[in-house]
Image (cartoon, rainbow, N blue to C red):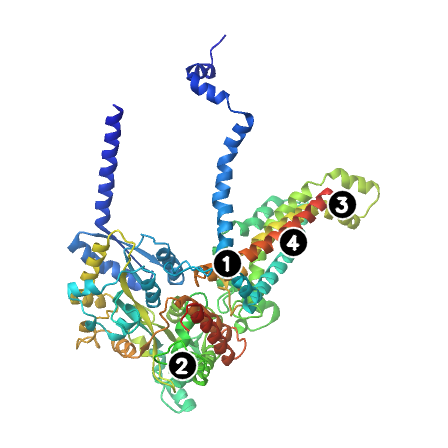
Amino acid sequence: MVETTVSRAAKATSPRVAKRIRGLSDRAIAWIFVAPTIFLLLAINIFPLIWTIRLSFTNYRVNRPNKDVEFIGLRNYERILTDTDIWMTMQATAHFLFWTLFFQVLIGFTLAWLINQKFRGNDLWTTIIVLPMMLSPAVVGNFWTFLYQPQIGIFNYVVAFFTGADVTSFSMIGDINLAPWAIVIVDTWMWTPFVMLICLAGLRSIPDSIYEAAECDRASKWRQFWTITVPMALPFLMLAVLFRGIENFKMFDLVVQLTGGGPGNTTTLTSIDLKREAFERWRTGYASAYAVILFVTVFGLASIYVKALNKVKER
Amino acid sequence: MKKTHLLAATAISAATGLAATGAQADELTLCWASWDPANALVELSQGFEEESGVSMSFEFVPWPNFADRMLNELNSGGKLCDLMIGDSQWIGGSAEAGHYIKLNDFFDEQGISMDDFIPATVRGYSEWPKGSPNYWALPAFGDVVGWTYRKDWFERPELQAEFKDTYGYDLAAPETLEQLRDIGKFFQGREIDGTKVYGMAIYTERGSEGITMGVTNALYNYGFTYGPEGDPYQIEGVVNSADAVEGLEFYRELYECCTPPGSSDWYMSENIDAYRSGQVAMQMNFAFIWPGVNADPDVGGDRSGYFPNPAGPGGHFAQLGGQGISVVSYSDNIPGALEYIKWFAQPEVQAKWWEMGGYSALRAVVEDPGFATSQPYAQTFLDSMAIVQDFWAEPAYADLLLAMQDRVHNYVVAGNGTAQEALDGLVEDWVEVFEDEGLR
């Protein structure tokens, strides 16, 4: 018999060690492999979550190490849920979420459908279209502040060119009516390519044979679109909405760079407000309760949505 | 053999550890905001490095993130900074949380007297509780909100004539807030040398402290106070008094009538940019920018003038800026940090600090007969430092500041509600903070 490296190593292993290794069951070996992951998960996800929930019932402030921490029951939750300012930030977040998803799905799907039409140079167009999402959100936020600048920004000039309005007569990020739309426009510009790519993957996964069969049945292009393209691409579209929905619910960097949450509180989204409570006002207990409420909201909505997504996939 | 290896390893570890400790003793890290004076301090500190053999490193953070970054560092007991030039409002919180070491004994040992510094800076940057002889910092950089104006534009005969015809008095650096508004209106939208210009750049920034540092310059001068003497937390009817409401309305009027479009989130750097690029006739800003303005090739020298915050119907005040230098209690090199403060407090170092563009708060420097004429802005600095008022410096200052940022920005920039509603809301917010703090 030829002696291999493995057999040489086996021979060299002392009988005591060999016995111990042979003594491990498959289940034990599985645990050995899984344990580090579980430990990490507990340490960096579960433990902080439990700790946050615990803090949410206290008046703890991280910047007051010398102050006694008191258990205050549900007072933080009560204050948050009855605070009109927080409801305003919820409204701002809902506005941002709804309109960004609406425009990104509409434009993203349209672009994907156009790119899928296999024309000359469509690879080049795909590359050009996806460029915005490759940029850092902070950079995007920063340079859009220049684009929106009423005196030098190109945005006002373009709008003025098409509408005849005075260039400096409006300020996208300084006006309470326009600022919520200013952040929607930038997020849509940046993330529509992402939705487009997912939709494109969905469209390309539809076998040509289905369209050929529809052609044989003399189905019109319109009918093919509504009965083949849309239903088969729908799970992908829903997945894109899920990703973008979660991302935009916790939107922070882009909006902070762009408007700082202003003017007033017009574009203060919940994540910006939460950050202020936790790391500017240092109301740790209060911010923990706020975080728990947001977590439950996102988790609940995402669970409902994922169930719907699975139903669509099963169809 | 094994024992020998173990001993050797222990010895190497110990030696390395000792070497590391030794290296730390020769190093100091100073934390401050990233701005022009910080660059001057780096240059100034070379003198300390040469004298002491200690190597200095610096951690500078841009103003909008300065408080976030540094308060995080202090709250987490971080050892990054041995010396902290922290904002004046941090003094209460940092003293009570034990972030800074108390300097009274050190000052006594070294013969450093707080009487040698401008009283407003001692109160603003060093004392906690306010008015008590407990010192947590050495006044490092005196600063105050003041104004810069385009002297060359103001001196144009055709503009002077037109202004006098319109307003009935001479176009010059304004002495009252009403005059400031008139001049702002006069320049707003005017074409100068083929460029459309605007009245003034004022603080409107929302994210950190900007609009509060701006609006207080109007509020104080209309009679706003934080609370009655002796019972500062009974603020109802004081913070939201009729005078305060008028002051807030005035600031909104300035924003509406006389600022460039899109200036809805401007603070120090945006105001500097607007002024340097010739967009505005006047800018509100802290005095630290004046050396830079004076040296600017486009707007510097005789083209610019400086004036203190103009008086209002309720008084004559200006918002205090500036910082003190403190020793961080978590530092591994507290003796080295104290040595730096001792060096920095020397009159000759303070004089050099002023020469390099740092605003010394040492009376020997600012009361020197030659000081007022040493720079075109020196007299304005002195006049401004004589009228300063500061924001709250309580441990809960961040709560108080952010509430004010929200309420004021919401009224002045967003135009939501009335000034009375904004200040009533502010009173509610502040009362809640004081109650949470057990102060009332």
Name the side, left or right, on which B309 lies relative to B263: left
- Residue A57's label in the rendered image is 1
Tell me the kind of residue under disc 4.
Val
Name the side, left or right, on which A83 lies relative to B284: right
Where does the image place residue B57, in percent across and percent down from the top left? 27, 53
Name the side, left or right, on which B351 lies relative to B34: left
In front of the other: B213 or B129: B129
- The chain ID associated with circle 4 is A
Q: Is residue A266 visible?
A: no
Disc 3 target residue: A228
* Circle nearer the N terminus (3, 4): 4
- The chain ID associated with circle 2 is B
Would you say the residues marked 4 and 2 are in contact, meaning their CB atoms lie under 8 Å apart?
no
* Circle nearer the N terminus (3, 1): 1
Mark 4 → mark 2, Cα distance in angstroms? 51 Å
In which quadrant is the N terminus of chain B drawn? top left
In front of the other: B257 or B95: B95
- Residue A105's label in the rendered image is 4
Where does the image place residue A135, in percent across and percent down from the top left? 50, 51
> Which residue does the image show at 19% across and 76% down from the upper left?
B367
Disc 2 target residue: B224
Is the residue A111 above or below the residue A20 in the image? below
Tell me the kind of residue under disc 1.
Phe
Q: Could you classify mark 3 by the number of other residues whose Cα lies within 10 Å: few (under 14), some (14-19), or many (20 or more)?
A: some
> Which residue does the image show at 21% across and 45% down from the upper left?
B22
Q: Secondary structure at mark 2?
A: loop
Would you say the residues marked 3 and 1 are in contact, meaning their CB atoms lie under 8 Å apart?
no
- The chain ID associated with circle 3 is A
Q: Is residue A147 visible?
A: yes
